[in-house]
Amino acid sequence: MDKSKTKYSLDYYVRLAKEIENAGAHILAIKDMAGLLKPYAAKELVGALKANIEIPIHLHTHDTSSLQAATYLMAIEAGVDVIDVALGGLSGLTSQPNFNSIVEMLKFHKRSNEFDITSLNAFSNYWENVRDLYYPFESGLKAGTAEVFKHEIPGGQYSNLKPQAIALGLGEKFGQIKQTYEEVNDLFGDVIKVTPSSKVVGDMAMYMVTNGLTKEDVWERGDTISFPESVKAFFIGDLGQTVGGFPKKLQKIILKDSKPYTNRPNAHLEPVNLDAEFEEVK
């Protein structure tokens, strides 16, 4: 956890986990889409959660930084119940950590499970060959990158963003797009970035790079800028409310004369008669 950032503290995660458990959840998922959870932070987080809730804990992460096998090991030591992995030939980078390697990592560990590693390696080799056919759709990364701890782009989005940039003629500006993504996240108040909120940050970053806009332009000329529809929908409240609320000044700039929701999304709509709708569906 970045000690310079205080918005998402350990207390915040423990409190949220308790709320989820009290709401009736059967399992708690830690969804780390960008792979930002570092090993010792994972040990601290999972340990605190295990001490405060009773339901199983499932950790999901992407290996963009190449650190996440170590994160899994520390989480396992702290008592995490489930981890997500990807078969060797499909793992790493913006995918999940390597299943085959983690099986070997946990060999003789008290929490190891029995897997046929010869079979796993054979399947891995098969899918590694299949993967070549889809290479044009991959992220373009050739190695893990610590840059992810700066821009915080989720793994699934990273592998989509590069082809999108190329399609818009911005392939050579991908480095600028990543930097702008970081700036937009800061501008939006450090939001939780997972589908679809991460797409909103990406849409804004691409829009700014395409139109040569800076953060200063947004503040100074925002009243004359027509922002992407996804950004306007985000700030009006279509995706719900952000932790700590939206930055009010920016919300006004983006929405112009439109009024944001003060309640849950679509609370202004008439209630739906589910029985009548079900009959129509049938």
Image (tube, helix red, strand yellow):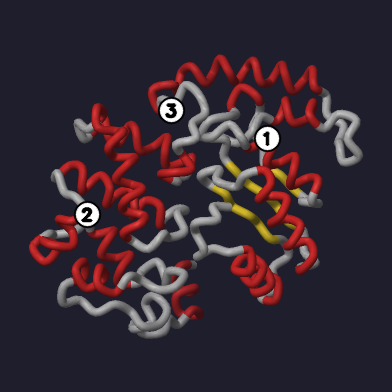
Q: Residue 151 at what x, y percent from top left? A: 41, 44
The answer to whether residue 212 is above or below residue 137 is below
State which mark lies toward you, 1 or 3: 1
Q: Residue furthest front?
A: 4
Q: Nearer the viewer, residue 45 or 227?
A: 45
> Which residue lies at the image location 73% right of the left edge and 65% below the top edge?
26
Spatial CA span between label 1 and label 3? 21 Å
Q: Residue 37, percent across and down? A: 60, 47
Mark 2 element type? helix
- Residue 11, image quadrant: bottom right
What residue is shown with label 2?
215
Neighbour class for label 1 at 10 Å: few (<14), some, many (≥20)? many
Disc 1 residue type?
Ala
Query: Is disc 1 in contact with disc 3, using a CB cutoff of under 8 Å?
Result: no
Q: Which residue is mark 1?
A: 69
Mark 2 residue crowding within 10 angstroms, few (<14) / some (14–19) / many (20+): some
Comparing marks 2 and 1, which lies closer to the viewer? 2
Left of 255 or right of it: where is 92? right
Whole-percent x, y for residue 1 in the image: 58, 52
> Where is 252 relative to 213, above or below?
below
The Cα atoms of the two marked residues, 2 and 3, are separated by: 29 Å
Name of the residue lying farthest toward the left:
224
Q: Earlier in the sequence, mark 2 or mark 3?
A: 3
Total number of numbered discs in the rendering: 3
Q: Which mark is residue 138?
A: 3
Amino acid at dot 3? Glu
The residue under the point 52% across, 21% down is 131
